[in-house]
Structures are given as structure tokens and as C-alpha cells.
Image (cartoon, coloured by chain):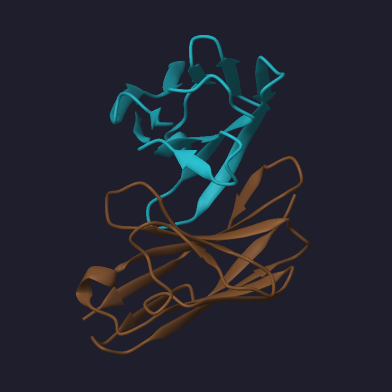
């Protein structure tokens, strides 16, 4: 069964620190992996999309990496700010015409 | 990229009634989807909205409860029928581009009393 896991479920860090969010998936034959951000009661905002042929993608203070052989992706957030507080979701497209979502990591940045 | 809007943004409905949620995309997308997100949970796929034909439903979801239409490439509706308090959730519409990047609408927050 194709599954996506995110650990930890919740994370609190002081403002200004760099942090890493983790995503693991059970099948290395992926087409792409996408990181989203969700604020409470809101929709999902796409942060980064990594195609299967890529190793990483960067946008501003965010960097996402992909290691298909180990079934892992990380989202690195540099110099965290209170506005980064949200739930971060990882989603994998395994080629079966739908995304498989992880359960998310709820991030709190402490001012 | 695609920009997706949903109407209404939120609603409070009585048990036994139905609500239709509209989803509009600003450009053509290859596929459209409807998700449900119950409080504190991740997203659950309800169905794939197919243009001009019946939607493809995931296990546990049926057309009588969640009828879906997609008359063209940029518009879809989801109806939540005969609502109960267990249907209180955020309902999200999404669409995919050619390279399977997925975009989401802002969601519709439904409360059933």
C-alpha cells in the first residue's frame, strides 16, 4: 500500500531557528512530491513541487529535498518567523491519478 | 499556475438539508477533485470530478450523498445531501496542471446543526 508519513505531528521552535520537517513514503516509484502549507480553517497553499528527476527545489527561505531511494523528503525552513506557524502537508503523486497526503506537521514558531 | 475560488466560504445548515458548493478555476485544468477535511484530520479524497460524465468516487463515498457535476473544464459543484452533524467539515476543491502540480481552493467550512 502506498502511504505517506510525517513525523513529528507537532513541532515548536523559537523564532529565528532553522528547522527541518520530514516526510517519508513507502514506494520509491513516485512522479512528484509537493509540500503545502495550511493555516487554520483555510485551504492549502502550494509551497514547492519536486519532480521525480529532481533532488531539490528552493523558494525564498524554503528548501525541499527528495531522496527517492530512501523514500524521504525534507522541508528546510531557514530563519523561522512567527508567520511560518501553520500545518505543513506533504503529498506524493504515485501515478494513480490522485495525491496521497501525509497527516501533516503542525508547526508553531515561538516569538 | 491556477487560481481556484469556492462559494460559499462557510455556511451553517440544518440537519436534513442540502448544500451545493461551487468551484471555479481561472484556467483549464486536466483534473478536478473534491476533498473533505474533518476537524483535526488530514484530507480525504471524496471523488474525481470528470467533465461531462459521472464522477469517480472513493471508497466510502456515494453519489446519492455527494452528487458532483463538472459541466466544463473550469467549473464543478459538490452537493452535500441530507446533511447530519457528522458532515461538518471543510470541503476543498482542487485542480491539477499537466505536470500534476495540484492547486487548492480556499475551502468551504460547513457546520451542520
Q: Residue at x 67, y 42 (%)?
A: B101
Is A68 positioned to the left or the right of A100 in the image?
A: right
Q: Nearer the viewer, residue A95 or B14?
A: A95
Q: Residue at x 43, y 65 (%)?
A: B91
Work out which residue is located at the far top of the displayed protein and give it: A69
User: Residue A16, position in %: x, y?
Assistant: 45, 20
Is A2 positioned to the left or the right of B84 in the image?
A: right
User: Residue B7, position in %: x, y?
Assistant: 54, 76
Work out whether A44 lies above or below A81.
below
User: Residue A25, position in %: x, y?
Assistant: 45, 24
- The brown one among the chains is B
User: Residue A96, position in %: x, y?
Assistant: 57, 41
Is A12 positioned to the left or the right of B95 in the image?
A: left
Residue A109, by quadrant, is top left
Q: Please count the marks in the image.
A: 0
- The cyan one among the chains is A
Q: Residue at x 41, y 84 (%)?
A: B19
Q: Residue at x 63, y 32 (%)?
A: A48
The C terminus of chain B: image quadrant: bottom left
Residue A29, by quadrant, is top right
Amino acid at each position: 500500500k502506498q502511504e505517506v508519513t510525517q513525523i513529528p505531528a507537532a513541532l515548536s521552535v523559537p523564532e529565528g531557528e532553522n528547522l527541518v520537517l520530514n516526510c517519508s513514503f513507502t514506494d520509491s516509484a513516485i512522479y512528484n512530491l509537493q509540500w503545502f502549507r495550511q493555516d487554520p480553517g483555510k485551504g492549502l497553499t502550494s509551497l514547492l513541487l519536486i519532480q521525480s528527476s529532481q533532488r531539490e527545489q528552493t523558494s525564498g527561505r524554503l528548501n525541499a529535498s527528495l531522496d527517492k531511494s530512501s523514500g524521504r523528503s525534507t522541508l528546510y525552513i531557514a530563519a523561522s518567523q512567527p508567520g511560518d506557524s501553520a500545518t505543513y502537508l506533504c503529498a506524493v503523486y504515485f501515478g494513480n491519478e490522485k495525491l496521497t497526503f501525509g497527516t501533516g506537521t503542525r508547526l508553531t514558531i515561538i516569538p | 499556475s491556477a487560481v481556484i475560488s469556492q462559494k460559499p466560504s462557510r455556511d451553517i445548515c440544518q440537519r436534513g438539508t442540502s448544500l451545493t458548493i461551487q468551484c471555479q478555476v481561472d484556467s483549464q485544468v486536466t483534473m478536478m477533485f473534491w476533498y473533505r477535511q474533518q476537524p483535526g484530520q488530514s484530507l480525504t479524497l471524496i471523488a474525481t470530478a470528470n467533465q461531462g460524465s459521472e464522477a469517480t468516487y472513493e471508497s466510502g463515498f456515494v453519489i446519492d450523498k455527494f452528487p458532483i457535476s463538472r459541466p466544463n473544464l473550469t467549473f464543478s459543484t459538490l452537493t452535500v445531501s441530507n446533511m447530519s452533524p457528522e458532515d461538518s467539515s471543510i470541503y476543498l476543491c482542487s485542480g491539477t496542471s499537466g505536470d500534476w502540480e495540484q492547486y487548492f481552493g480556499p475551502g468551504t467550512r460547513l457546520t451542520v446543526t
